[in-house]
Image (cartoon, helix red, strand yellow):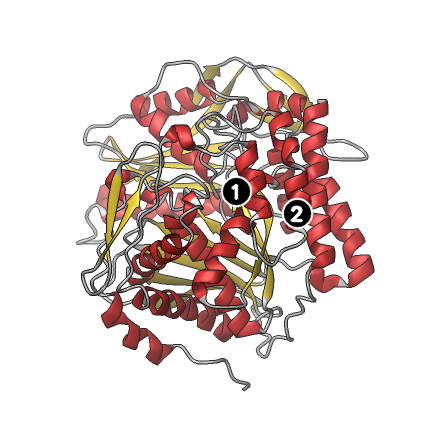
């Protein structure tokens, strides 16, 4: 069934930095890094209902009406079309042909098969719209909708916005800068300065850090790349309490009560335990939605920032350093990817290939808006897949919320043994639980302008009070600079402080900015790096953190040779 559409913003031009970043990854992996899924439809839904949704999507969002034009000596150009038509696939399931007792599982299975087919076949971005949609119909009624989009259309934060607006059929004009406008602004002097500052940040840190060489993998496998998932309710609760303890000792840092730095610190310390690399050049995915004009865009704008974490000292000290390092990473996670690749290549030529450490974390929890996750009584880990197709050396996607967390690990067995990858995830939980247990008697108060309070309960019932930071207290360029300079143990960050004007001049910080670390798949959850705890949502029951400590300790062991 052909669905016609019409929308604004037609034109052509270069790719935006967010699109270019995705294009480089897709080209390297030979994949579209597609996003999407299957959704059950309300009773009585018809083909026209699904067609109406597809028409809405194609008409509203410019990125869904975008095709690429190849270039001879560089990245492709993009063309946004003002109108066109797209095929809605109708897949009929004959109820009478289903196995006895299968019932409604028949349409569900067919929908899953359609999704798998859509995901398996790379998009032709030159001659195909970057959107595929199907309606699975049984008994004359549409039971499921399948929607899959190329990563060039949106990232994780954009997906959350797209789903909310589509459910509400929002008719208000689209807000924010679409990709063509972003590309235009990136070529202006302010954009050039932002790019230069970001490149300087990466170059300075990569040339200053100790050698991050990871020992050779002790278990090189075929298939080469493995995927594992850790489900936990203990980890997010422990991180919240540990973050509150860090906040009590760093009251001047308004981000001290947020769990995101604690999550990053737990990962860095665990990575150091498993690999021996004690200063970790972590690639931290940022949604970039804190930049002016980006908060309400669907198109991909997320990029990775370089977050150098020194794991020396106790966990509270690491969290403190991580706060400043993460803030610097977010600030500089906005650049021309081809320029950055040239900078990294120059560092590699001078210092060695280990300085291009492909280790990333993507906290895309978004309060659970992107993906709901299971809530097991005990933490669980399982290997869920393996493949030979290219993937990252080590990439973590963090989904869920502050109550339940799922960490999906993509690991290259030629980089790190799968058993060591599993040990790393268990170590993250053990580190957080130990830090939370040390916070049993802590009570921290962080002062903010509006005086709102929120409470977190530690394992023994002790409470820590956090004063929420109002939106008006969100960081401005000066805050970012101060955060960079305040990061102990990272002399290179002083250069970031000197470049504070780069952010302000570029006009990238919105007035009510909350710096987040979110992106696409695998490569988004809100990770506030500077704003305070939101009053209503800050309460965390961590009553079983102490009980979990012994259980976790039993399962975390130092990796040994085999």
Q: Residue at x 49, y 46 (%)?
A: 521
Instruction: Name the foreground residue: 528 vs 349.
Output: 528
Residue carrying label 1: 286
- In this rendering, does residue 440 appear at all? yes
Mark 1–mark 2 distance (CA, rounded to whole Å): 21 Å
Q: Residue at x 31, y 63 (%)?
A: 439
**Image x and y of residue 7, in percent:** 49, 14
Q: Give the quarter of the figure containing the N terminus.
A: top left
Q: Tell me, for residue 494, which label it has, or none.
A: 2
Crowd band around label 1 with a 10 angstrom C-alpha radius: few (<14), some (14–19), many (20+): many
Height in image: 307 above or below 75?
A: below
Label 2 residue SS: helix
Outermost residue toward the bottom in this view: 562
Instruction: Name the foreground residue: 350 vs 445.
Output: 445
Q: Is residue 77 left or right of residue 138?
A: right
Q: Is residue 457 left or right of residue 29?
A: left
């Amino acid at each position: 069934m052909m669905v016609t559409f019409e929308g604004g913003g037609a034109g052509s031009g270069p790719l935006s930095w967010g699109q270019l970043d995705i294009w480089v990854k897709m080209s390297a992996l030979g994949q579209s890094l597609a996003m999407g899924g299957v959704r059950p439809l309300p009773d009585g839904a018809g083909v026209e209902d699904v067609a109406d949704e597809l028409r809405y999507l194609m008409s509203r969002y410019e990125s869904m009406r975008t095709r690429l034009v190849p270039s001879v000596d560089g990245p492709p150009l993009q063309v946004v079309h003002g109108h066109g038509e797209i095929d809605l696939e109708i897949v009929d399931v004959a109820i009478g042909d289903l196995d006895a007792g299968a019932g409604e599982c028949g349409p569900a299975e067919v929908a899953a098969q359609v999704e798998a087919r859509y995901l398996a076949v790379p998009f032709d971005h030159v001659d195909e719209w970057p959107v595929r949609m199907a309606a699975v119909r049984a008994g004359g009624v549409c039971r499921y909708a399948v929607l899959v989009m190329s990563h060039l259309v949106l990232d994780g934060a954009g997906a959350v916005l797209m789903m909310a607006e589509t459910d509400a059929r929002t008719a208000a004009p689209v807000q924010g800068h679409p990709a063509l406008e972003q590309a235009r602004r990136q070529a202006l002097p302010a954009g050039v300065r932002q790019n230069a500052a970001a490149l300087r940040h990466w170059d300075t840190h990569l040339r200053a850090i100790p050698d991050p060489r990871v020992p050779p993998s002790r278990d090189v496998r075929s298939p080469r790349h493995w995927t594992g998932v850790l489900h936990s309710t203990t980890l997010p609760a422990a991180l919240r309490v540990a973050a509150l303890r860090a906040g009590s000792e760093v009251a001047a840092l308004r981000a001290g009560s947020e769990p995101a730095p604690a999550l990053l610190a737990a990962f860095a310390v665990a990575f150091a335990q498993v690999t021996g690399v004690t200063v970790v050049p972590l690639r931290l995915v940022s949604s970039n939605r804190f930049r002016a004009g980006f908060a309400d865009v669907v198109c991909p704008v997320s990029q990775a920032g370089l977050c150098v974490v020194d794991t020396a000292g106790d966990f509270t000290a690491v969290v403190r350093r991580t706060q400043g390092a993460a803030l610097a990473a977010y600030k500089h996670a906005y650049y021309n990817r081809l320029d950055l690749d040239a900078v990294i290549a120059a560092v590699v030529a001078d210092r060695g290939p280990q300085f291009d450490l492909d280790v990333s974390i993507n906290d895309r929890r978004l309060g659970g808006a992107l993906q709901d996750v299971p809530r097991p009584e005990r933490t669980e880990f399982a290997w869920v897949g393996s493949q030979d197709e290219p993937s990252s050396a080590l990439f973590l996607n963090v989904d869920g919320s502050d109550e339940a967390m799922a960490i999906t690990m993509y690991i290259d067995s030629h980089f790190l043994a799968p058993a060591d990858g599993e040990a790393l995830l268990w170590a993250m939980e053990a580190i957080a639980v130990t830090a939370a247990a040390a916070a049993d008697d802590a009570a921290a108060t962080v002062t903010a302008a509006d005086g709102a309070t929120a409470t977190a309960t530690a394992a023994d019932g002790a409470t820590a009070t956090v004063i929420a930071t109002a939106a008006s207290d969100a960081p401005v360029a000066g805050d970012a600079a101060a955060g960079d300079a305040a990061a102990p143990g990272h002399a290179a960050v002083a250069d970031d402080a000197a470049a504070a004007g780069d952010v302000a001049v570029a006009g990238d910080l919105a007035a009510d900015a909350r710096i987040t670390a979110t992106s696409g798949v695998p490569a988004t959850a809100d990770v506030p790096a500077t704003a305070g705890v939101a009053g209503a949502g800050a309460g965390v029951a961590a009553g079983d953190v102490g009980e979990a400590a012994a259980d976790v300790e039993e399962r975390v062991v130092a990796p040994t040779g085999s």
